[in-house]
Image (spheres, coloured by chain):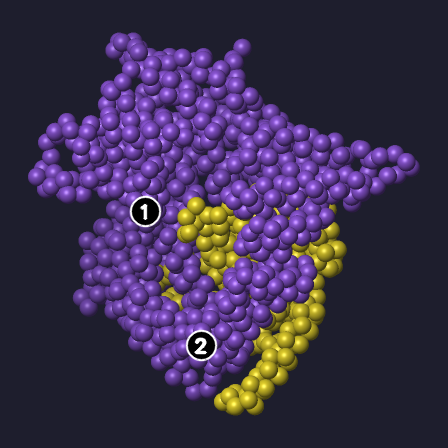
Chain colours: A yellow, B purple
Amino acid sequence: MDIVMLHPSHIPHVQTCNITNLPENYFAKYYLYHALTWPQLSYVAIDLSKPPKSPHDPPKIVGYVLAKMEEEPVDGIPHGHITSLSVMRTHRRLGLAEKLMRQSQKAMVETFGAKYVSLHVRVSNKAALRLYKDTLQFEVEKVESKYYADGEDAFSMKQNLDFIWDAVKKEEALYKKDEKKSDAEGGEGGDEDEGDPVGDEGQEDKKPKEVMRKVKIGRALGVSDLVEKVEQPKAAS
Amino acid sequence: MPSQQPLASKEASLFRNVLKFYETKQYKKGLKAAEQILKKNPKHGETLAMKGLLINCQGKTEEAFQIAKEALKQDMKSHVCWHVYGLLYRSQKNFDEAIKAYKMALRFEPDSQQILRDLALLQIQMRDYNGYIESRRLMVMSKPQIRQNWTGLAIAYHLAGNLSEAENVLTKYEETLKQPPPRTDLENSEAILYKNYIVAETGDYQKALDHLESISRTAVDKVAILEARAEYNLKLGNNEAAEKAYRVLLERNPEKRLYYTGLEKSLGVEGEERLKIYEELAEQYPRADAPKRIPLDFQEGDAFKSVAQKYLDWRLKRAAPSTFTSLKALYGDVTKRECLESLVEEFLAKTREEKPVENGEKLTNGSSTPNNNVLIYTLYYLSQHHDHWRIRNTEKALSYINEALELAPDNADQGELKLGLARILKHAGDVRKAMEEMDNARQKDKSDRYYNTKCSKYMLRNDCNEEAIKTMGLFTRNDVNGPLGDLLEMQCVWYITEDGESYVRQGKLGLALKRFHAVYKIFEDWTDDQFDFHSFSLRKGMIRAYIEMVRWEDSLWSHPFFRRAAVNAIKLYLLLNDKPHLAHGSLANGTGDGAVDFESLSTTERKKAMKKAKREAQKQEKAAAEAAAKAKDERKGGEEKKQDDDPLGAKLAQTTEPLEKALVWLKPLLEFSPTFLEGQTAGFDVYMKRRKYLLALKCLLAAHSIAPEDPVVHEQIVRFQNFLNTKPELSPTVQSIIDETFTLAPKEGTLAEFNEAYLSSHADSARASFSVVKVRQVLGASEGSESEALIFDALKKEGATLKDAVDGLALVKELKGDVGRYTEEARQRWLMANVFEVKA
C-alpha cells in the first residue's frame, strides 16, 4: 500500500471504505468539507495489488484517517479531532492505522499548531479501543453518554502532541543549522526571520478572523444567499 | 430609475420584515407579512416576487414561477424581481436561465455585490470562465481591499488557463501589502503557496523554485514545500538538492512510492546500486513495507528469489492476512509467481518442522501460539495463491484453507479464514455455499461491519435481495426510509449497483433500472456538492485544495462507479427497445426459465399475456404501496417518508422511448470516458438503433483504436459492413464520410470469410468463438449445428472462464441448442458452479 494525502478524487472510495467498515457514515460532501478546510490532515492508504485499468482511474482505498481541527475549542486550546479512521479487515496488522495517524498528527502541529488530538470511540468497540489505547497511546478522558445515534456511549479520548512538537523543533533546529552552513558557503544571506512553527499566538490571532467570517454579506440588499453554509454532517463521530 | 411607486412607510417596514423572515427561513411568517402588503398593494412587484420565493421554499415550484412572472409583469425594472426570478431557476438547477435573470437584475442594480456574487457562483459552476473573470474583476474593483476578491480573480484566470494573468493578480495584491503578513496568517500561507503552484504549472521550474525558497519559511504547509522542492529540483536536474529533499520526505513518510521513484531518479541508480539504496532504506526504516517490497518489482531471476525470500520471511512471520495482497501485483509474471509459490511452500515446510511440541504431543488444534498463527497464515497465503485467477486450482485452494481452519480455534482467525473460504467458493461459482460461509464468518463477530458488508454482498451475488437488505439493516440507520433509504442517502454506490445487477439477473428490469438511476442521482449530487465550495473555499483560503476539487469534478463522470451503472442501464434500455414486453415482470424471463416464452406466442396470445402481466404488475404495486402505508402507520408520525410513486421501477421500464433514455447515460460515458471500450461498443449499438450511422461509426472507430482484436469490435465491424451492403439510402455527405473513414472491413472476400479468418486467428479465445457464432447468425452464414459445436468447443479452451461458460449457455439458448448437454459438459469443468447444477 501507499500512504498519501487525501485528494478529492479519492473520496468515493474512501466513502466505500468507511461504509464497509464502520456504522458512522457520511455523504461525500462531508469528506469534501474536510479535504477543503484542512487538506493537510487527512490521509489514505492506497491498494497497490491491482494495476488500475486505465491511468486515470482512481485507486482503491484500504484505509483512511479523516481529521479536522476543532473550529471553536471549548477549552480555547487549538486541537485536532479524528472524525473517522478505519482500515479494511484484509489489511489489518500492517500498522496502517498508526502510520496514517502519525501523518495527520504531524500536520496538525506544523500547520495548525495543535496541542492535542481528540476522538470518540464506541465503548463496545474493543478492537478500536485497543488500537487507540495501546498502539497509539491515547487516553480515555471521559465517557460521553448516548453519544451515538443508536444510544451507545462513547469514550472521549485524547492524546497530547508534545512528542511531535519536540520532534518538529528538532527538525527546525537541524534545518536552521543547515541553512547557516549553506549561507556560509557563499549563498545569499537568508533573511533570519522567526523560525518557530505556528504557535499559540497564531491561534489567538486567528480568532477574530473566524468570527468575521460569519458575517453575512448583502443583507441590506434583501435577497440574501443562504446556501453558503456547508451542511452539517449526518452523524458526528 | 422609474420603478414602481415606493411603498408607504408601514408597508415598507413590513417589506423589510419579509426579507428578514426569508433570510431566517421563517417562511410562513414571511408569507403572512407579504400577504399583508399585497392586501393594500396587490400589484407591488417586489412583494409579489418575494411571495413567489417564499412559496418556492415551501416546495410549490410551479406556483412560485407563476407569481414571479406576475411580479416581473408589474415591475420589469426591479432588480429584486429579476434576482428572485434567477433564484427560482437556480433552485431548479436551470443555471443558464438563472444566469440570464441575474444579468438582467444587474442591469438595473449594477452595484449590487450580492447579485454579482450569485451570478459569479453560477458562472463558475457552469465553467463559464470568461463570464466568471468578468464578474470577479468587477468584485475586485468594488472592494480591492479584500484579499479574497483578488484570489477569486486569480482563480478565474487560472481555471481559464491564463496562468500569467493569474500570477499577476496575486502579485498585484501582494504589492499592496505594506508589511508582510505574520506567519500565523493561514490565508496568506496558502495564497503564496497557491501562487507557487501556478508558477510551476507554467513549466518554469527555476522561477517556481526561486519563489518557493523565498516563501519556504512563511508557508506552514511543510509537506507541500518539501514535495515542491524535491520535484522542482529533480526537474531542473539539481540532483543533489532533489535527493536531499526526497530523503527528508522519506523520513516523514516511508510509505509513499513517489518519494522512492524521486530518490532513484535523483541518484540515477541502476542495477545493483539500485538494490543497495533500498537495503539501506529498509534498515533505516525497519517498520516500513515499501523499501522491502519495491525491489520485488524490479529484480528478476535469482536476484528476485533472494529479495522475495527476505520479504516473505518478514511478512509471513508476522502472521497477517494481507501478505498475498501485497504480492498479488507480481502475479502477471509467471516466473515470479512460481518462485513465490515454491518459497512459500519451503517456508511452510520449515514452519511445520519448527512447530512447538508441548508435553510430547504435537499441537494440531491447540492454542494459538505465535507459531501456530504463522502456520495458519502461511496456509492462508497458499490458499489465496491457488485461488488466483491465473492459477485457479480450487481443489488445492480449498485444501489449504481447510487445513488452516482446523488449526484456528480462535474466533477472530476463524472469521478471517471463513472469509477466505467464502471467496474461493464464490470464484468457483458456488455462490450459495459462499454466502453460507460468509454468513458463518459474520456470526463470528457480529459487531464487525466488514463481515456484515461482505455477507450482504455475497447474498446479493446469490440473488437473495431480501436477506441482503435485512443484513445491511443491522448497521444502517433505520429511521423513516429504512435500510435502503439510509444506503441511498449515504451514497453507498457499491450496494445499489450490486442490487441492480442482481435484479438484472432475475429479469426484474424495473427494479434494476431504479437502482442504476439511483447511482445516476448520486453522481448528480456529487456534481452539485461543489457549488457551496466556490464561496466557502475563498473564505477558508485553502485554494490549492479547491482547485484540485474543481478539476476532479470536471472528470467526475469518468468514475468507474458511474461507468459500471451506465453500461448496465444502456444494455437494459437496448433490451427494452427490442423487447418491450420485458418491462412486465412476469414476462421478463431474463434467464429463460419458468416464464412464458413470449416471442413464440401468437398476436392474440401476446395481447392476452400482456394484459395478464399488467394486472399482476398493478397488484404488486398496490401491495408495495400498502406495505409502505402500513410501515408508516407503525412509525406513528415522526418524519414523513419520502413519497415514491414508482417503488418497483415499473414506470422506468415501461418507457416509450428507451433509446432516448439510453442517451442520458451514453453521453456522459462517451464524453468523459472516451477510452472505455464497453462505452464505445454500447454507443455503437445505441446509435445504430437510432439510425445515427456516423455517430455509430465514430464509436466503432474509437473502439477499434482501443482494442482492435476485441471480439465485440469484430462483431460490430461486420455488422456495420453488412448494414452498408444492404445499400441503405444515406445522404451523399454521410455516404462519403463513411467511404473515407470506414476501412476496417475487408476490401476483398466476403464477410463470412472475414469472420472465419477471425476465428482461426483467435483459436484460443472462447469469447472470440462466441463472437464468430453471433456474426454467423447475423450473416445467416451457417448451419446451427456447426455453431453449436463451436460453442461446445469453447468450453474446453484453456483460458475459458466461468463467466465465458455462462455467456456460452445464453448463446446456446438463443440458438435453441442442446442446453442439457451444454450444462453437463460445463459441469465437468466447473464442478461447483451453481449455474450448471441439475435442477431437481
Q: Residue farthest to the front?
A: B302
Is residue B695 rendered to the left or right of residue B769? left
Residue B820 x, y percent position in the rendering: 45, 12
Position of B233 relative to B387 (above/below): below
Residue drawn at the location 63% of the way across and 35% of the way down: B383
**Label 1's element?**
loop
Q: Which residue is mark 2?
A: B209
Residue drawn at the location 34% of the way across and 36% of the way down: B710
Q: Give me the chain letter of mark 1.
A: B
The front one of B490 and A218 is B490
Q: Amino acid at mark 1?
A: Pro
Q: Quadrant of residue B157?
A: bottom left
Dot 2 crowding, Cα within 10 Å, few <14, some 14–19, many 20+: many
Position of B383 relative to B581 (above/below): below
Q: CA distance from mark 1 to mark 2?
A: 36 Å
Q: Which residue is mark 1?
A: B674
Residue drawn at the location 31% of the way across and 24% of the way down: B774
Mark nearer the N terminus (1 vs 2): 2
Position of B121 relative to B403 (above/below): below
The numbered mark at residue B588 is none
Residue B50 x, y percent position in the rendering: 32, 55
Residue drawn at the location 79% of the way across and 40% of the way down: B353
Q: Give me the chain letter of mark 2.
A: B
Position of B319 relative to B717 (above/below): below
Residues tagged 1 and 2 counted as in contact (Cβ below 8 A):
no
Residue B777 x, y percent position in the rendering: 28, 21
